[in-house]
Structures are given as structure tokens and as C-alpha cells.
């Protein structure tokens, strides 16, 4: 009897604890966004209390931050790197994952290749940073084209893992039927398999967008020409030797954050569903 009561208590959902954790999560997530937005609308004289609402809204902070960071040029650089990375990542990484997944049971080479790619997920970027800088400089890849290529390559381990989990769920009978109809391997992939992977394409695209758009370290160590800098590197302009203009800095942060925040809000369901379907066999 006691065991039955204990099981019922353990299985009964604790709504109070759930509510408390939800409130904490809301403050942790929305708190920094609130501070960034409030500070970006303030005068320097209103900075006595960073949490208080601005007495007079200063929309001019955004236009001033736009000019100081050369936002148009930096936005185009970041946009080019991000979009090209997404397009080539979806095409090349899905092809690689398809070839590996369908041949893992047939060939030890592809099985080893799969684990080789997956193992790269556990290598921190800091470990390969110095050798990478030397190689990039030697091959003259310290520009937007070179860093875009590196984003495609560095995304391969994670994307191979996601795509492989999704491809396992696609019946091989579809490919066999296409082969019987006379389709080549490329036609089988692009006309049969590739369209079926739309949910995973969306997930990979969103994750690649968020990673590339928010990345600071790789552009910092690889991009040598100031004209090739991204939006993240442009934030250094607000850091002086003895002071920092927090109002303009946070206005610039909001401008940089807005695209990726909107992307996540509208497409978050694809991220969750895609990661789950890629991780569960």
C-alpha cells in the first residue's frame, strides 16, 4: 500500500516546481534582452539605474551606431558569408551524409569515415586556431571567401550526424524503385532523397545561420582586411581606451541581434523537430 502511494506521488506532476522553473527560465532568457533594449534607448545621463525605463527615448542611438559601425558594409559581409555558407552546406553536407549513411553497413571505410567526422565535434576550435591561422595566411584565404569555405567544412561533423539520423528513416525501397526506372545515383539523390529531407534542411539552415551570424572568434583571427570584417567585429568601435559608450554599443548589439532573433522566433519548431528526428533512430 505504501509503495503504491509512493509511486503515485512520484508520478504526480509537480506544477509548483514547473511554474518556478518556468519563471526562472523567463528571467534568464528575457532579462538580457530587456537590458539590451532599455540601455540602447537611454541617454548616458540615465545610466544610473540600468534596469529602469528610459526617461526620454533616444532613437538617434540606432542611427549613430549604424554610422559608427559602417553597418551597411558589415551587414553585407556577414550576410554574404551566412547565405553562401547555408546554400553550400545544405548541398554538400547532405550529399556526404547520404553517401556515408547508405554505405556504412557495406564498407568499413564509410563506417570509419562516419566516426572520423563525428569525432571532430569534440575538438575545440581553440586547439586548432594557431595552425589554422598559419594555413589560412599561407593560402591567402583570410577573406570572406576563405572564411565561408571554412564554415562549410567545420559544419560537416554536426551536419553529418543530423543528416545521417534523418536519412536512416527514409526507406531504401524508394531509391531501388528509382534505380529500376533508370535513374543515376545523382538523380536518385536530388530527385528522390533531397526533397524528402526538407525538415532537416530547414534545421541545418537555421543552425548554420545562427552559428555563422553570431560567430566572433573565427572572423577575429582570420579576417585581416578591415573591409572584410563582420558585424560582430564592428562592435569594437565602441570600446575606447578609458571608457565605453554603452548606449550606442547596446544599440548596435540590438541591430546585430535582431535578424537572428527573428529567425529563431519564426523557425524554432524546425530546430526542435529536426534535432530530435536526427538524434533518434
Image (cartoon, helix red, strand yellow):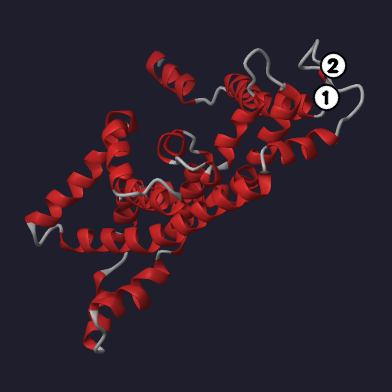
Q: Residue lying farthest right? A: 56
Residue beneath the point at 40% across and 64% down: 197
x and y percent of residue 170 in the render?
31, 65
Task: Tell me the quarter of the picture where residue 10 sits.
Answer: top left
Disc 1 crowd, CA 10 A, few/some/many (<14, 14-19, 20+): many
x and y percent of residue 106 in the render?
9, 62
Residue beneath the point at 42% across and 37% down: 218
Q: Residue lying farthest left? A: 108
Q: What residue would you read off at disc 2?
A: 46
Q: Is residue 59 left or right of residue 279?
A: right
Q: Is residue 137 left or right of residue 225?
A: left
- Viewer-proximal residue, 239 or 271? 239
x and y percent of residue 14 in the render?
56, 22
Q: Residue lying farthest top? A: 48
Q: Is residue 139 left or right of residue 71?
A: left
Q: Is there CB contact under 8 Å for labels 2 and 1?
A: yes
Q: What residue would you read off at disc 1?
A: 42
Amino acid at each position: 500500500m505504501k509503495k503504491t502511494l509512493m509511486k503515485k506521488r512520484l508520478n504526480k506532476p509537480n506544477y509548483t516546481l514547473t511554474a518556478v522553473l518556468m519563471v526562472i527560465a523567463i528571467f534568464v532568457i528575457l532579462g538580457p534582452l530587456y537590458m539590451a533594449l532599455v540601455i540602447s534607448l537611454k541617454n548616458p545621463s540615465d545610466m544610473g539605474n540600468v534596469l529602469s525605463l528610459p526617461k526620454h527615448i533616444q532613437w538617434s542611438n540606432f542611427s549613430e551606431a549604424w554610422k559608427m559601425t559602417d553597418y551597411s558594409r558589415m551587414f553585407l559581409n556577414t550576410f554574404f558569408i551566412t547565405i553562401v555558407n547555408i546554400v553550400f552546406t545544405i548541398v554538400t553536407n547532405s550529399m556526404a551524409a547520404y553517401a556515408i549513411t547508405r554505405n556504412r553497413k557495406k564498407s568499413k571505410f564509410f563506417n570509419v569515415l562516419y566516426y572520423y567526422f563525428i569525432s571532430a565535434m569534440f575538438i575545440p576550435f581553440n586547439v586548432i586556431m594557431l595552425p589554422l591561422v598559419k594555413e589560412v595566411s599561407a593560402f591567402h584565404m583570410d577573406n570572406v571567401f576563405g572564411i565561408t569555405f571554412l564554415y562549410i567544412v567545420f559544419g560537416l561533423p554536426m551536419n553529418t550526424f543530423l543528416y545521417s539520423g534523418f536519412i536512416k528513416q527514409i526507406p531504401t525501397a524508394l531509391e531501388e524503385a528509382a534505380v529500376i526506372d533508370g535513374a543515376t545515383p545523382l538523380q536518385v539523390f536530388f530527385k528522390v532523397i533531397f526533397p524528402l529531407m526538407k525538415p532537416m534542411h530547414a534545421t541545418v539552415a537555421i543552425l548554420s545561420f545562427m552559428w555563422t551570424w553570431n560567430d566572433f572568434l573565427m572572423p577575429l583571427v582570420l579576417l585581416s582586411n578591415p573591409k572584410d570584417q563582420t558585424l560582430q567585429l564592428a562592435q569594437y568601435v565602441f570600446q575606447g581606451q578609458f571608457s565605453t559608450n554603452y548606449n550606442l554599443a547596446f544599440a548596435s548589439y540590438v541591430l546585430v541581434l535582431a535578424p537572428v532573433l527573428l529567425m529563431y522566433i519564426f523557425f524554432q519548431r524546425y530546430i526542435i523537430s529536426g534535432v530530435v528526428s536526427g538524434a533518434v533512430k
